[in-house]
Image: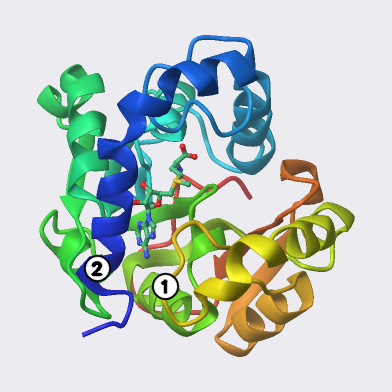
C-alpha cells in the first residue's frame, strides 16, 4: 500500500466538504464568482494559456486521442482538453471521491458519450495501470497529464506514476506534468513564505503543503527512466512543467498517431 494511501484522498475530500463555507471569501479575493473547488486556483486566461502551450502545439487536434489525467479535481483542465481535442477521450483519475462527484455532476454529457471516464484511484502503487486496464487502455494512451496537482505529491510516490506511465503510454506518447520547483524565483518565495504555516506540522501529513523538487532533479530522474524530456517554462513561472516522451525506439505497441511529429 502506498503511504499516500486513501488518507490522502480523505484530506482532499474534506477540502471539498468545507468548500461551501469558503466560497464567498474566495469569490471576494478573486473578484469573480468561485462556484466549484478549483475555480480558486489561477485565472481563466491562465488556464487557457496552459492548454495552448502544453497541448495544442503537440497533439493532433483531429486525431482520436486517448488521454489519462491525474488529479482532475472538478475538471477545469479536463473540460478545456475535451474542447481542444474534439475526438479525444479522457480517463480522469483522482484520489478524492468528492472531487470525482463534482467532476461527474459538471460533465454529465461527456460521461454519457463516454468521452470522460472517471476513476477513483486505489492506494496501490500500480493504481494508474489498474484504472487504465478497466478501459483496455494499457499501452494505448497518447497523453498522460496532470496540472496543478502533483506539486503536492512527493517524488517517492510520484515516481510510481512515472513508472506506470511507461506501461500505459504508447511509444512516442507524452507525459505532461507540473511539479513543485523550489529553484524558480516564485517557487523559492513560496518555500520561504510557507515555513511558518508548516514547520509545526512536521510528520502530521500537513494538507496542502508542496513537495519540493527542482527541474534538474525531475529531468535527471525521468531521463534515467528512459523518457526524453522537454521543459515548458511558458506554462508556469513558479512550477516546473515538462513534457516527457516515452522512448521513440521502444518496440512494444503502436506508435502514437495523436502526437504531432
Ligand atoms: C490542487 S487540486 C487541482 C485540481 C485540478 N487539476 C485543477 O487544477 O483545478 C489537486 C487535485 O489532485 C488530486 N490529488 C492529490 N493527490 C493525488 C494523487 N496522489 N493522485 C491523484 N490525484 C491526486 C486531489 O484530490 C485534487 O483533485
Q: Secondary structure at mark 2?
A: helix
Residue at image point 61% right, 25% down: 48
Q: Secondary structure at mark 1?
A: loop
Quick check: can you spot residue 247?
no
Residue where numbered disc 2 is placed: 7
Identify the coloring: rainbow
Residue 138, horizontal then vertical, whole percent: 24, 66
Residue farthest bottom in this picture = 224
Quote the CA–CA distance across marks 1 and 2: 9 Å
Residue 217, horizontal then vertical, whole percent: 71, 81
Locate the N terminus by quadrant: bottom left
Q: Is residue 186 above or below residue 82?
A: below
Residue 28, horizontal then vertical, whole percent: 58, 14
Residue farthest right in this picture = 185
Given contact means CB atoms under 8 Å apart, are the residues at marks 1 and 2 in contact?
A: yes
> Is 94 in front, or is 202?
202
Residue at image point 39% right, 80% down: 160
Residue at image point 44% right, 60% down: 207
Residue 108, horizontal then vertical, whole percent: 16, 21
User: Mark 1 or mark 2: which comes first in sequence?
Assistant: 2
Query: Which mark is on residue 205?
Result: 1
Residue at image point 74% right, 45% down: 236
Neighbourhood count class around disc 2 (C-alpha, 10 Å): few under 14, some 14–19, many 20 upward? some
In the picture provided, is 88 more to the left or to the right than 261?
Answer: left
Residue 243 falls in image quadrant: bottom right
Residue farthest top in this picture = 32
Amino acid at each position: 500500500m502506498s503511504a499516500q494511501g486513501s488518507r490522502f484522498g480523505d484530506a482532499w475530500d474534506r477540502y471539498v466538504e468545507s468548500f461551501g463555507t469558503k466560497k464567498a471569501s474566495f469569490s471576494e479575493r478573486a473578484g469573480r464568482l468561485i462556484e466549484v473547488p478549483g475555480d480558486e486556483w489561477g485565472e481563466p486566461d491562465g488556464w487557457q494559456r496552459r492548454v495552448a502551450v502544453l497541448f495544442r502545439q503537440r497533439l493532433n487536434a483531429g486525431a482520436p486521442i486517448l488521454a489519462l489525467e491525474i488529479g482532475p479535481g472538478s475538471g477545469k483542465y479536463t473540460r478545456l482538453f475535451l474542447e481542444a481535442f474534439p475526438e479525444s477521450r479522457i480517463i480522469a483519475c483522482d484520489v478524492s471521491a468528492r472531487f470525482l462527484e463534482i467532476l461527474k455532476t459538471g460533465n454529465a454529457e461527456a460521461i454519457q458519450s463516454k468521452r470522460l471516464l472517471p476513476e477513483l484511484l486505489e492506494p496501490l502503487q500500480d493504481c494508474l495501470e489498474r484504472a487504465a486496464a478497466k478501459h483496455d487502455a494499457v499501452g494505448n494512451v497518447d497523453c498522460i497529464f496532470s496540472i496543478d496537482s502533483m506539486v503536492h505529491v512527493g517524488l517517492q510516490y510520484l515516481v510510481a506514476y512515472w513508472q506506470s506511465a511507461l506501461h500505459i503510454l504508447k511509444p512516442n506518447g507524452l507525459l505532461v506534468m507540473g511539479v513543485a520547483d523550489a529553484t524558480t524565483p516564485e517557487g523559492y518565495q513560496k518555500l520561504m513564505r510557507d515555513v511558518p504555516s508548516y514547520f509545526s506540522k512536521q510528520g502530521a501529513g500537513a494538507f496542502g503543503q508542496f513537495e519540493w523538487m527542482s527541474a534538474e532533479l525531475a529531468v535527471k530522474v525521468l531521463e534515467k527512466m528512459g523518457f526524453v524530456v522537454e521543459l515548458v517554462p511558458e506554462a508556469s513561472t513558479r512550477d516546473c512543467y515538462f513534457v516527457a516522451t516515452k522512448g521513440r525506439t521502444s518496440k512494444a505497441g503502436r506508435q502514437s498517431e495523436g502526437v504531432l511529429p
